[in-house]
Image (cartoon, rainbow, N blue to C red):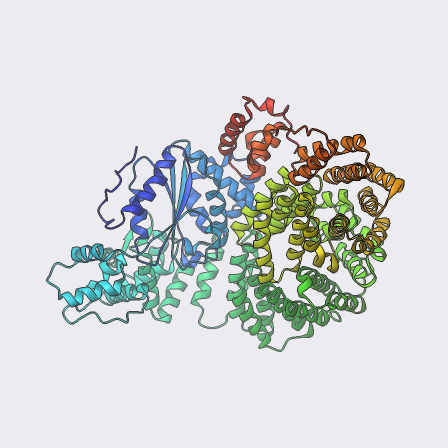
Amino acid sequence: MRRSRPGTERPGLLGRRSESDVLDQLLDGIRSRRGGALVVRGEPGIGKTALIDHALAAPGLKVLRADGAEFESELAFAALHQLCKSTLRWQERLPAPQRRALDSAFGQTGDGAPNRFHVGLAVLNLLSEAAAEQPVLCVIDDAHWLDQASAQALAFVARRLQDEPVALLFAERDASDRHELAGLPELMLRGLADDDAHRLLASRIHVPVDSAVRDRIIAEARGNPLALLELPHTADLAGGFVLPAASPTSGKVEASYQARLAELPIETRTLLLIAAAEPTGCPMLLGEAAEQLGVPDDAVTHAQDSDLLAIGDRVRFRHPLVRSAVYQSAALDERRAVHRALAEATADTDPDRKAWHYAQAARKPDEDVAAALERSADRARTRGGIAAAAAFLEKAANLTPDPTHRAVRAIVAARAKRDSGAADSASSLLSMAEATPLDNLQRATVATLRARMAFDKNRDDAAVEKLLRAARLMAPLDTFLAREAFLESLAAAVFVGRFTTADRMLDIAETARAMSPTPPKPRPLDRLLDGLTTQVRDGYTEAVPELRQAVDVYRRGAGRDAYDVGQLWVACGPAMDLWDDAAWRELADRQLELARGAGMLAELPVALSYRALAHVHAGEFADATALVGEAHAIAAELGTPAMLHVDVTVAAWRGDEERTTRIADIATRDADARGEGRLLSATEYARTVLLNGLGRYDAALAACQVAGDLDEISFHCWIPVEFIEAATHAGRPDLAEPVMKLLSERTAASGSEWALGTELRSRALLTQGPTAEKLYREAIERLARSDGAPHVARARLVYGEWLRREGRRSEARVELQAAYEQLSVLGAAAFAGRAARELAATGARVRRRVGDAPTRLTAQEFQIARLVATGATSKEVGTQLFLSPRTIDAHLRNIFRKLGITSRRQLRDLPLTT
């Protein structure tokens, strides 16, 4: 039942009928066990707090609250701890990994960086436990000031509340760059309509007002409710309201508060300043700092009487802009004195906040404070707060008195700032370092960081040149760091692809070999660099032994200490080029496992994409789709580009022309805009697969012509095969012959069943008579011993087509029917359709397959069904997929309904392998 009828309004919500209805729908949803989230956005004073109060007044809800604070925006998990404090009594019910992650996040243990996904899942399950008693409303005000770790965790939870009686209500400024909340349902608050603004102003002004003055107030407030309520306090209503029309509303409101502050006693203003500088809202801390500064007790009464501050269980300002006005209006020395008092009042059990207050209080560089900040940064990094670590390090650098030591700290801080995405701050810190005489290694380090930042911003050849120049600077100074830089340069050049200069990769490979020889005890990274430089310099065949050795080293690596997890995606490329599908699958599995286990969010989309491509190779399109969906969700949470190259490849193999075309068009635009040559090549490959499946061979040949000519690393096993099939069917064997020669040399060097089967099938397309038949048959046999189920089916398809052209219709029907059956089961619709047309051409009646029930499941439902079919519990499935057990159970009900079954045991008997 709705709390209020549509169209009704509560006091204080003048002109917000539709907005309050949106909130009521969210709250009605959780009463019906439908969870959700809403981000209320708007400029300061526009009415976000009033809408939150509207939601808080709803009966029958358990309310949890967290307020973002500017001073805590760099403290990892600070806001999350606020929100979850009252739910921690259920922590013992959580699985051990989630309990440990939560303890680490909240600083209860020193177990290392918490697994971000385990933290998010722990919070989801805590809220689920809380909601078992009554629906839960979580209010997160001032979300634009959330620390990054809390924002990521809360966004994670917000996207997984479908079947939980829990709602997350965020309020943030419309200018926020809080990308973690992107994609959540949002409600944008605009200014009040003129009629409503007139009525609101009239409620605050009880004396006659000149109509021109009143109209100017309305015009300049631009419908901002707080401006309409507060500005009359200081406006000279008789003489007019003189403020620049273009000034931000928040500036006007803060000026209003500052004028009211000026009327208060100095002791009261000091108390308010302490409260403004202390973001936790702790009354005890406020009192202790006030006592140190000699603030009398009656200042509390005056502060509350001013209607600017309320002191209860927590200290709260009437509005966030009051805090800003109080702090900004204070003199610098007054702020420093307050921060020093707060630092001395803060308990030693909170060393990070103590160090931060001391830093704000510092009048000049102070090594003791800088060292304390550096220690805080180490703690923040251990807990996973890279943004907090970067902030502490930046402040530490600024407060370091010794120039040489300051430069060292500035470089470290710049690296952390760059890793946290704060490129401007990183650049400023590097400039600080460069203002001090640097040694050669420091100069090379600065150059490397600047080059990485250039590549982050513009993935073009100029950025690749900067990376190479930095690697050259590093080479005579530190071989290990130089080889890392050269590998990074080479990977960047491969990424830029066609957008780099023709000889760029060769230049990098030659320089790396000349300036940074392989160390006596090579790391996995060193072997990988050697193999790739040989491939660039001397060609694929010469590089095979080194590439195979590098891949084997990574396969044998035990645990995350054996190598940098982020290198595994680079190693997956040579595994594919070697046609070693077993190694490719194993490395992709390991990368995904380690990235999940370590909570490495930035690595997960890449890990998921390589594992998804391995699924595509095996014809497991549903599994690939599920991983692509997960990768998209994580990329959205991180604000990174989506994995379009995998998405378009899956769509192409499934024969979905509309989806392939749509994604390919988007990917092409993105690739051109960002300079991602590899994305263009992947898109051209996908278009070719689709067109070959549809039998449009001329178009397929045109689609892969550019990628075929480029012959790029990591595409050796993909592009040539499609090119040869398109060229031969388009009647252009002359174009296929040189590609076939190159393919034969490479597959012979590889020697895997996948490689040799691919070569035999491609050669058969260019061969006539009995020899062709022998090649086709052997190709099918060899491919059947690889993971590539779709490639086996396609080999049978082209063999059947050849038999039909030879006039051997009955034999052709056998192969074509088998190909049709296999391709249909796999879900390769375009190739199955091509097989069906060929069968019809032999005079056979096509025995069309009826789709299996599992094909009616969504990608996520399919993934859940597969896991449950193995005997996994809802809790175990939820842990793996980062959903609550309650959500898993809700999905299972839909799965059972769609499949016409009633139990988990029945899932084991269904074909859930496609």
Residue 348 relative to residue 228: left or right: right
* Residue occupying the point 29% across, 50% down: 50
Q: Is residue 433 visible?
A: yes
In x, y percent, where is residue 299?
25, 59
Q: How many numbered circles does the render carry?
A: 0
Residue 723 relative to residue 380: left or right: right
* Residue occupying the point 62% across, 31% down: 866
Residue 289 picture quarter: bottom left
Q: Quadrant of the N terminus?
A: top left
- Foreground residue, 92 or 828? 828
In x, y percent, where is residue 675?
62, 62
Residue 609 relative to residue 424: left or right: right
- Which residue appears farthest toward the right when viewing the image? 770
Residue 580 picture quarter: top right
- Foreground residue, 160 or 648? 648
Residue 42 relative to residue 813: left or right: left
* Residue occupying the point 64% across, 41% down: 654
Q: Is residue 109 visible?
A: no
Residue 738 picture quarter: bottom right
* Residue occupying the point 54% across, 29% down: 895
- Foreground residue, 568 or 111? 568
- Which residue appears farthest toward the left when viewing the image? 208
In x, y percent, where is residue 103?
52, 44
In x, y percent, where is residue 53?
30, 46
Q: Quadrant of the C terminus?
A: top right
